[in-house]
Image: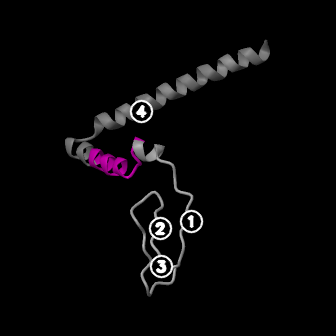
Amino acid sequence: MSAYVERLVADAQTRAELEELSAHTASYYDSLSAKEAEELRAWGELGESALPTEAQRQTPKSSVPLCLSGESVTYNSPKIRRAPDSRW
């Protein structure tokens, strides 16, 4: 019974902390000027554009290893070719 009560108390504390965090977050964003909000929105869009799309997440990765032979290989991306004089 004690463990159950402890769990209830911990859950209530977690909910209270999340509500407080949510209130502070809302207060922060409400205090931004239109220019600051637009800049943050633009940064968010830029970051989001770097995330894989749903289709990309569902595409299985190729098991073909990358090699240094100079041959082009496909590895879940456009063909990759080593430059003749590069040494990676």
Kindly identify the amino acid type of the residue bearing the numbered disc 4: His
Rounded to the nearest angstrom, the CA distance separating label 1 from label 3 is 13 Å
Label located before the other in sequence (1 or 3): 1
Residue at 29% over, 37% down: 31
Left or right: residue 39 versus residue 68 is left
Rounded to the nearest angstrom, the CA distance separating label 2 from label 3 is 9 Å
Label located before the other in sequence (3 or 4): 4
Under tag 4, what secondary structure? helix
Q: Mark 2 and mark 1 in contact? Answer it, CB < 8 Å.
A: yes
Question: Any magenta on residue 43?
Answer: yes
Q: Which residue is mark 3?
A: 70
Question: Any magenta on residue 70?
Answer: no
Kindly identify the amino acid type of the residue bearing the numbered disc 1: Pro
Q: Position of residue 11 (x, y in %)?
A: 62, 21
Give the number of the mark in front: 4 or 2: 2
Residue interval drawn in magenta: 40-54
Rounded to the nearest angstrom, the CA distance separating label 4 from label 2 is 50 Å
Kindly identify the amino acid type of the residue bearing the numbered disc 2: Val
Q: Which residue is mark 4?
A: 24
Rounded to the nearest angstrom, the CA distance separating label 1 from label 4 is 48 Å
Label located before the other in sequence (1 or 4): 4
Residue at 57% over, 58% down: 63
Q: Mark 3 and mark 4 in contact? Answer it, CB < 8 Å.
A: no
Q: Position of residue 78 (x, y in %)?
A: 39, 62
Q: Which residue is mark 2?
A: 73
The one nearer the camera, 50 or 69, is: 69
Rounded to the nearest angstrom, the CA distance separating label 2 from label 1 is 8 Å
The one nearer the camera, 31 or 79, is: 79
Label located before the other in sequence (2 or 1): 1
Q: Which residue is mark 1?
A: 65
